[in-house]
Amino acid sequence: MSLQAQFELNGKVAVVTGASSGIGRAMAGFLAAAGARVVLVARRAEPLAQVAAGIVSAGGESACVSADLGAPELPAGFAEALSEPFGAAHILVNAAGVNLREPVDEITRESWAATLNLNLATPFFLARELVPGMRAAGYGRIINIASLQSSRAFPNGLPYGASKGGVAQLTRAMAQAWSSEGIMANAIAPGFFPTQLTAAVFSNPDTERWAAEQTTMGRNGKMADLAGPTVFLAAPASQYVTGQILYVDGGFTAR
């Protein structure tokens, strides 16, 4: 296989959760640009349709499946609905997530459960639903979204940090369970990128500056910075990479 072919996704089907905005939306676009047919998943149908239209207008292929992944159970027949547009998925990006940013004394059992369900339980149960198709194809790539809080503690982030610490270990456990069958599981841990989840940081010039100053590069992330890591972890090029947490953080965790 040529070097160029190792980074192509022609003929591959990718499912991306949280695809209506932020990092999920960007990653879906990168996968489509590399040749994958992308199934977009999120709760809100209208933003999903806008993302799909953008992919199609750029020459890609895309379909939408609207679902509330924060529910206690995955919808009945969900795996079948995801495979209906293009066939069984080869690639799963678990980008759906929530960070309620509650002070520790205000955390309730309900908010705790909601955070760990969407951020940690859903990625596992969805992956398990899609693994049989990956196994049959002899090709699978699972990309979870970890966080700086997978290894660092931040104020008002206890449930989120617990869930993202769990995502790091979940990724390693997925690799142990499925890599021998050609299914690689890795995670991207983004630094500070401008998204809905980080609006509190980027809406304040002081906190935005603080975040940039914590990196070794002196700047916060741009969505384009995720293109290479996303395609690499989805593509044949990552065939001997599994169970890893790739920090795409401008050197934040290097300090």
Image (spheres, rainbow, N blue to C red):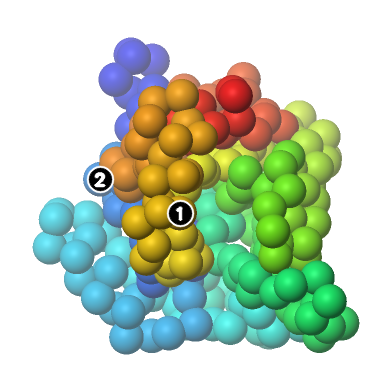
Q: Earlier in the sequence, mark 1 or mark 2?
A: 2
Q: Amino acid at mark 1?
A: Thr
Q: 237 and 210: which one is in front? A: 210
- At a point 64% along the width and 74% down the height, the residue shown is 100
Left or right of 60: which side holds 254? right
- At a point 43% along the width and 84% down the height, the residue shown is 44
Identify the image quadrant of the C terminus: top right
Residue 221 found in image quarter: top left
Which class describes the residues within 10 Å of circle 1: few (<14), some (14-19), or many (20+)? few
- At a point 30% along the width and 53% down the height, the residue shown is 29
Residue 198 position within the rendered picture, expressed as x and y whole percent measured from the top left: 47, 61
Residue 105 position within the rendered picture, expressed as x and y whole percent measured from the top left: 84, 76
Instruction: Check the image and report above or below for 67 versus 57.
Output: below
Q: Residue 226, can we see it?
A: no
Q: 77 and 65: which one is in front? A: 65
Q: 212 and 90: which one is in front? A: 212
Identify the image quadrant of the N terminus: top left
* Residue position for label 2: 33
- At a point 25% along the width and 45% down the height, the residue shown is 33
Residue 242 found in image quarter: top right
Q: Residue 152, can we see it?
A: yes
Residue contact between numbered discs 1 and 2, judged by CB atoms under 8 Å: no
Instruction: Check the image and report above or below for 218 versus 171.
Output: above
Q: Secondary structure at mark 1?
A: helix
Q: Secondary structure at mark 2?
A: helix
Q: Amino acid at mark 2?
A: Ala
* Residue position for label 1: 207
Q: Nearer the viewer, mark 1 or mark 2?
A: 1
